Image (cartoon, rainbow, N blue to C red):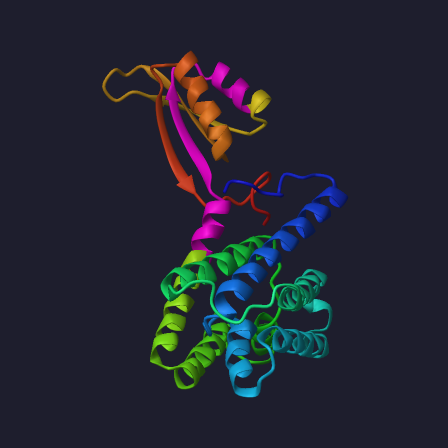
Amino acid sequence: MGFSIKGIKNPAERKAAEYALITAGILIMVIGTYFFKFLNHFAFGGVTGFSTVVSELTGITASDFTLIANMALLVLGFLFLGMDVGIKTVYASVLMSAGLSVLERVCPLSGPLTTEPLLELVFAVFCPAVGSALLFNIGASSGGTDILAMILKKHSSLDIGMALLVIDLAAVTMAFFVFGPATGLYSILGLLAKSLMIDGIIENINLCKCFHIICDDPEPICQFITRELHRGATIYDARGAFSHRKKTIIITMMKRSQAVKLRNFIRRVEPDSFIMISNSSEIIGKGFLEN
């Protein structure tokens, strides 16, 4: 994954791209939650985690409880947070609830798709993790317990990450008593895997390549960077420790697709250049992450 909407200049196009990403992320989460999480009673991940437990205890379907809980949390969010809840979060929360309800009615299922709970756990973790990462990367969330965590953060000294962890652990603990040790252990494994996977996916989305190029003639390389790749660069004068010859160091950062083009260009025009390429998932400045 190497895509980003940071470079879109037109506000209307950028807004459309954001909502397209939110829609895609939510739909991925809905598929993973409905087909793999609900049917196996995996109780991790906020409202949908609680939904599996409440559905077993009350008879209310997990999709319907998710809808009720998300709408109630949105109301609480507006009462305690005002407009801080955000239009993106409202849109994502409503789409998530509606998507689960539609799937339940269009594609009703009475049990897990397979007889391999570990295999289904992989998809129950992977799909929501990908969806959440897409949302978090553009400053949105799927609502639900995220709103509760935002309220706790605003009106207490509790850290938002700790608040979410406490909520998720409560759902997992309930799963032990309601569904038994096996499902409870699967839920713990899913909670840990999802947390790690979200961080990894976000880093992968934002991954950039940092170049340190030591060369004799910087002009053609700098022209290629600025004119063909539309990136900036910084130049330093240097001297070789062994040869004492004058050298130039070029420092530049870019996306992975551009990095391949630059590396191939340097190999063609300056084959004796020395190139150091490193990864970075957080570059703050014009053309990358916003301040």
- Name the quadrant containing residue 187: bottom left
Picture coordinates of residue 239, whole percent (x, y): 33, 20
Q: Residue at x 58, y 42 (%)?
A: 4
Q: Nearer the viewer, residue 40 or 44?
A: 40
Asked if residue 58 is positioned above or below residue 221 in the image, the reply reads: below
Residue 229 belongs to magenta span: no
Instruction: From the viewer's perspective, tell me whether residue 48 is left or right of residue 23.
Output: left
Picture coordinates of residue 103, whole percent (x, y): 63, 64
Q: Nearer the viewer, residue 94 or 16?
A: 94
Instruction: From the viewer's perspective, tell me whether residue 291 is left or right of residue 183.
Output: right
Q: Which residues are magenta?
A: 198-225
Residue 226 in view of the camera: yes
Residue 282 in view of the camera: no
Q: Nearer the viewer, residue 114 or 55?
A: 114
Residue 212 belongs to magenta span: yes
Residue positioned most to the left? 242
Picture coordinates of residue 22, whole percent (x, y): 64, 54
Instruction: From the viewer's perspective, tell me whether residue 181 is left or right of residue 113.
Output: left
Picture coordinates of residue 242, whole percent (x, y): 23, 19
Q: Residue at x 58, y 84 (%)?
A: 59
Asked if residue 98 is positioned above or below residue 16 in the image, the reply reads: below
- Name the quadrant containing residue 273: top left
- Name the quadrant containing residue 179: bottom left
